Amino acid sequence: MPDHPPRSPERSPSSLNRPRGMTLVELLVVIAIIALLVALLLPAVQGAREAARRLQCSNNLKQLGIAIAGHIAHREAFPHSVAYDGPTDGNPGPPDRNGQGWILAILPYLEQQPLFDRFAAGGCFAGSSPSGGLWKPGCRELMQLQTATLHCPSDADVLGLSTSQYQWIGIPVCQTSYKGVIGDTRMGSAHTGSPDCHTRTKCPGLFWRHTWFSPISPASVRDGLSNTFAVGEDVVAANHHSVAYYANGDYSSCHAPLNYFPQPPTPDHWPSVMSFRSLHPGGAHFCFADGSVHHVSETIDLTIYQGLSTKAGQETVSLSP
């Protein structure tokens, strides 16, 4: 019989359908492509998240502006504060220096009437430091109850209770990302601006710790409601004057440039850090006295910035170019 060449072994159907594994080179190429896509998409995702946080922050300030307007409609004046320590310009002060801040006064207009009522029922508006007013044991518990409108979503530290706040050391309290504007007054001797007034009964802005003595009506804002800062952003880790409902924790000054962050951080050095800042890129949000909210660039001219912080300085400045 004739010789036949040897036949190659036939592959079984199962071997023909078996997937071929990836080589090392192919695997590395796939990994590189995935890494490139992640690198391209991550900034867009982060940008979208920050845009959402900025929108929420702006909405928070808008709600504060509406609440301030509600207070004005019922009381014919901006909400006031009553610090536990009397002013230094000769006025003896009210009999109950309870420490109430302006944020506590607008709780009924923030849909927080039950919380305000709990402060009232607990006697938190009667008496003075160190055992009366907001320092009463029952009131201290209320000082821990957070209000979502007071929290900038870019400032994660604001969500926790703090035991490091000035005049509340060791006592846990909730914090606020939003501070009333005292004006451009120098806090102590730091930075530049008008003479220090923060311990007195009259200041150039709308909010400070002794406004109980000088109720501010909309008519007294002679620079115009749309040209006057009311409330701005702060970062709680940078400033240990951030107690949410307290008269000495809910205001700051425009004496320092916007977004001033001392390095290294000095949150307890109040003359330097009681100013406005945010963790948003490029600036911070402010609610004006007319209730409008604007993102203010950190590059704003200091003269314009400080002019916007006063209610009757007669400066010819505005946020618009």
Image (tube, rainbow, N blue to C red):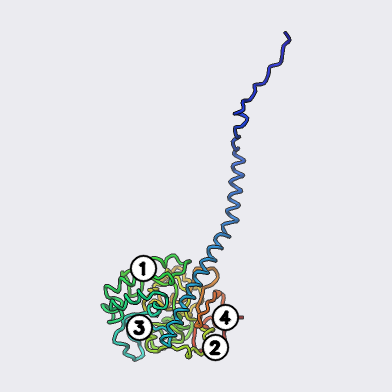
Type of amino acid at the residue the image marks with label 3:
Val
Mark-to-mark CA distance, 2 and 4: 12 Å
Residue type indicated by callout 4: Leu
2 vs 4, front mark? 4
Disc number placed over residue 319 in the picture, else none: 4
Query: Which residue shows up at 59% across the image and 36% down it?
Result: 21
216 vs 160: above or below:
below
Q: Are marks 3 and 1 in contact (CB under 8 Å)?
A: no
On residue 162, the disc is 1
Camera-nearest residue between 75 and 21: 75
Quadrant where the C terminus is found in the figure: bottom right
- Tag 2: amino acid: Glu
Label located before the other in sequence (2 or 1) = 1
Question: Which mark is first along the chain, 1 or 3?
Answer: 3
User: Which residue corresponds to mark 2?
Assistant: 315
Question: Is residue 186 shown left or right of residue 37?
Answer: left
